[in-house]
Amino acid sequence: MGEKQVLVTGACGEIGQALVQELSKRGAYRIVTSDLAPLPDSIKDLVVEHVQGDLVFKVKVFYDYDFDVIFHLAASLSSKAEIATEEAHRINVEGTMQLLMLAAYRSEKYGKAVKFIFPSSIAAYGMPNLEAKKKAGRVREEEWDSPHTMYGCNKLYCEKLGMYYSRFHGQKHLDDNPPVMMDFRALRFPGLISAFTVPSSGTSDYGPEMLHAAAQDQAYACFVRPDTIISFMAMPDAIKSMMMLMDAPRESLTTNVYNVAAFAITAEEFRQRALKAFPGAQITFEPNPRRQGIVDSWPEDVDDSRARKDWGWTPDYDMDHFFDNYFLPEIKRRYGK
C-alpha cells in the first residue's frame, strides 16, 4: 500500500510543527504544507512541498492533489480576531469553506472520502455569567454553544459547514447511488501548552507565560483573576487526539464534533506551581477586562465521554504528570535552571 498524501495548513504554528513531526515519524505519509510563512528548520526536511501564501487565494492550487487527509490548522486566534474581526472571518471561515469545497469535490468525483480533521476550540462555547459557568461544570458538545467572540463564532460555524459538506451536500441529487461524502471530524481543544515553544500571547497563555517569566527571574502580571479556571492540555496529547480521531473507523463515530480534555486548573494554581519550581517568582494579578471576559465565557471544563467511548480517547498527561515530567523539566533546561 502506497503512502497517503496529507495536507497540513498552518504548518508553521505550534500545533502544525508538532503534527508534521508526528506524521513524519509514522513514515507512511507524503506531507504537503501551507502557511503564510516559510517553513521553520524544525520541519523543513520532513515535507515534500510547501505552498506559501494566503490560503484563501492558494486553495485552487490544491485541486490537482490527491489528498487522503486534510488537517486544517490555519486560523486567526481569539485575541487577534477580536481586534481584526473582518480579517478573522475571512481567514477562519472563507479559508475553511474553500478547503471543505475542495474535499467535497474530490470525494464525490473520485469516489473516495477525503478525511478533513478540523481543530476547533472551547471558544465555541459561551457561558452567560460566572454563576452559570460554575454550575455547568463539565459541558457536553451540544450545550452552551453561544460563543462570545469572533473566533468562537467562526469555529462553531465552520463545524456546521463541515457537517453540511459531510452529510448533506448534494442531497437534492440523492438516488439509489448517493455521492461519496467527505469525512469531516472536529476536535474542540482546551488551552494547549507546548514545552518546546514560547507562548505567543494567546488568550489562554497566561499559565505558561507565568512559568516562562519565573524561570527567567522576570516579574509577571497575569491578565486574569486568580480564581479563573479553564481546561488545558499538553501539546503531545493534542497531537495524539488528532491522530486517534484520524485513525478511528468512520462507523464508530457517533458525531462530527468531539470534546477532548486533560485537566482543569485555576490561574492561582499555575502561580503556586511557578512558586514551587522557582522560589521568589514575582507574579501578580492585573486582570484585563477584555481578555478576562473572553476566558470567563469559556467553560471550566468539558465532558469528553463521547471521544472516550467512540474511539478510546484518554490523555497521557494529567496535571501532575504535565508539570513534573513534561513542562517544567524543559522550561528549566531552556533557561539553564
Image (cartoon, rainbow, N blue to C red):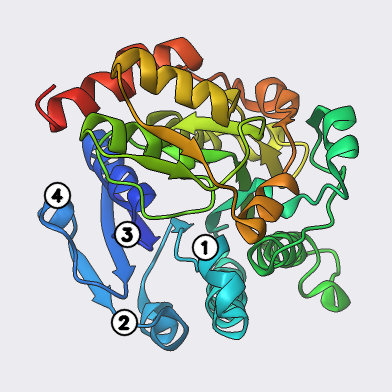
Q: Is residue 162 above or below residue 26?
A: below
Earlier-in-chain disc, 4 versus 2:
4
Does residue 29 lie above or below 56 as drawn? above
Q: Is residue 96 visible?
A: no
Indicate the position of residue 224 as horizontal and vertical percent values: 59, 44
Disc 1 element: loop
As drawn, is 148 to the left or to the right of 185? right
Answer whether labels 2 and 3 touch (C-beta < 8 Å).
no
For image coordinates 30% across by 16% down, the residue present is: 279
N-term mark: 4 or 3: 3
> Which of pointers 1 and 3 lies earlier in the amino acid sequence?
3
Residue for badge 1: 77
SS at circle 3: loop
Q: Are marks 4 and 3 in contact (CB under 8 Å)?
A: no
Q: Which mark sits nearer the N-terminus, 4 or 1?
A: 4
Tally the numbered discs.
4
- The residue under label 4 is which amino acid type? Ser
Q: Give the label on residue 42, or none.
A: 4
Q: CA distance from mark 4 to mark 1?
A: 23 Å
Gap between marks 2 and 3 measured at Cα: 12 Å
238, 289: nearer the viewer? 289
> Is 176 positioned to the left or the right of 188 in the image?
right
For label 2, the SS is: loop
Are there few (<14), some (14-19), or many (20+) residues within 10 Å of tag 4?
few
Q: Judge the density around disc 3: few (<14), some (14-19), many (≥20) Cα neighbours within 10 Å.
A: many
Q: Which mark is residue 53?
A: 2
Residue 75, x across and y down, in percent = 49, 66
Disc 1 to disc 2, how far (Cα)? 18 Å
Label 3: which residue? Answer: 11
Q: Amino acid at mark 2?
A: Gly
Q: Amino acid at mark 3?
A: Ala
